[in-house]
């Protein structure tokens, strides 16, 4: 059981769900676009959107929005201790904000779309920084004390450190318009690295808890 009483298996499943979304989403979005273009015999120009958020204007819009909604629900439902509960709930609502406030289209955006797009960027930035803080908190949790959990702590702390770095690099790339017009943009790369970092940390934490549950069951 967690300190707040949520069943350990539920925590494990939520961690797996969050981690799986983080690992798969950056790959599934362009792959889905490629499949849709291939099946419809199109040119494939929309396979790689300029950013992950740009997937809203591609064939994988529903996957992008649905994945963010699932991520938001998983994070809001997650309960472990007061510090992690606050971070996960905040991150969950931010994920929903990213889903329902789309980024502005790359061309011919109206004033309303630009305003909503600015809100989207705010939600997205806060979401990633909140997830970075959560990774740090998860790495310092009492369940991962002891020499046997050094790898888990390292992965969580590494993710908590790397995510802000990737977010800043993504912002600099976007502001400098580096890679505009490229099929695979640096902006998408650094966004994907941010999402992969937190996804990997959550999966490692899930596997560690699964191992612990298995050991308890065996005992």
Image (cartoon, rainbow, N blue to C red):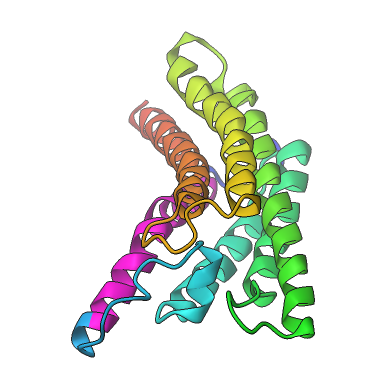
**Closest to the observer: 45 or 94?**
45
Instruction: Indicate the quadrant containing the C terminus: top left, top right, bottom left or bottom right.
Output: top left
The furthest residue to the bottom: 40
The prevailing secondary structure element of the residues shown in magenta is: helix
Where residue 48 appears, as percent x and y from the top left, is 38, 66
**Residue segment shown in magenta:** 9-37
Q: How many labels does the image show?
A: 0
Do we see residue 69 in this rendering?
yes
In the image, residue 33 above or below residue 179: below
Do we see residue 1 in this rendering?
no
Instruction: Indicate the quadrant containing the N terminus: top left, top right, bottom left or bottom right.
Output: top right
Residue 27 shown in magenta = yes
Q: Which residue sits at x=64%, y=40%?
A: 168
Where residue 4 appears, as percent x and y from the top left, is 71, 42
Q: Which residue sits at x=55%, y=66%?
A: 53
The furthest residue to the top: 147
Drawn side of residue 138 relative to residue 206, left or right: right
Where residue 135 sits, quadrant-wise, is: top right
Where residue 211 sits, quadrant-wise, is: top left
**Closest to the observer: 166 or 161?**
166
Residue 40 shown in magenta = no
**Closest to the observer: 216 or 92?**
92
Where residue 158 appears, as percent x and y from the top left, is 53, 26
Drawn side of residue 28 relative to residue 167, left or right: left
Where residue 107 appears, as percent x and y from the top left, is 59, 79
């Amino acid at each position: 059981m967690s300190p707040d009483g949520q069943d350990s298996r539920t925590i494990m499943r939520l961690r797996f769900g969050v981690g799986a979304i983080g690992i798969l989403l950056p790959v599934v979005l362009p792959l889905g676009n490629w499949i849709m273009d291939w099946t419809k015999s199109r040119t494939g120009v929309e396979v790689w959107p300029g950013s992950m958020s740009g997937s809203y204007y591609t064939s994988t819009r529903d996957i992008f929005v649905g994945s963010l909604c699932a991520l938001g629900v998983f994070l809001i439902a997650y309960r472990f201790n007061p510090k992690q509960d606050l971070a996960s709930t905040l991150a969950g609502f931010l994920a929903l904000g990213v889903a329902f406030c789309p980024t502005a289209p790359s061309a011919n955006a109206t004033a309303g779309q630009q305003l909503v797009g600015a809100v989207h960027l705010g939600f997205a930035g806060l979401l990633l920084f909140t997830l970075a803080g959560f990774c740090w908190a998860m790495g310092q949790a009492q369940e991962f004390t002891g020499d046997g959990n050094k790898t888990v702590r390292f992965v969580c702390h590494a993710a908590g450190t790397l995510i802000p770095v990737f977010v800043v690099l993504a912002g600099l790339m976007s502001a400098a318009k580096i890679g505009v017009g490229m099929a695979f943009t640096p902006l998408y790369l650094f966004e994907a690295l941010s999402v992969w970092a937190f996804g990997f940390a959550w999966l490692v934490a899930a596997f560690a808890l699964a191992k612990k549950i298995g050991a308890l069951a065996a005992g």
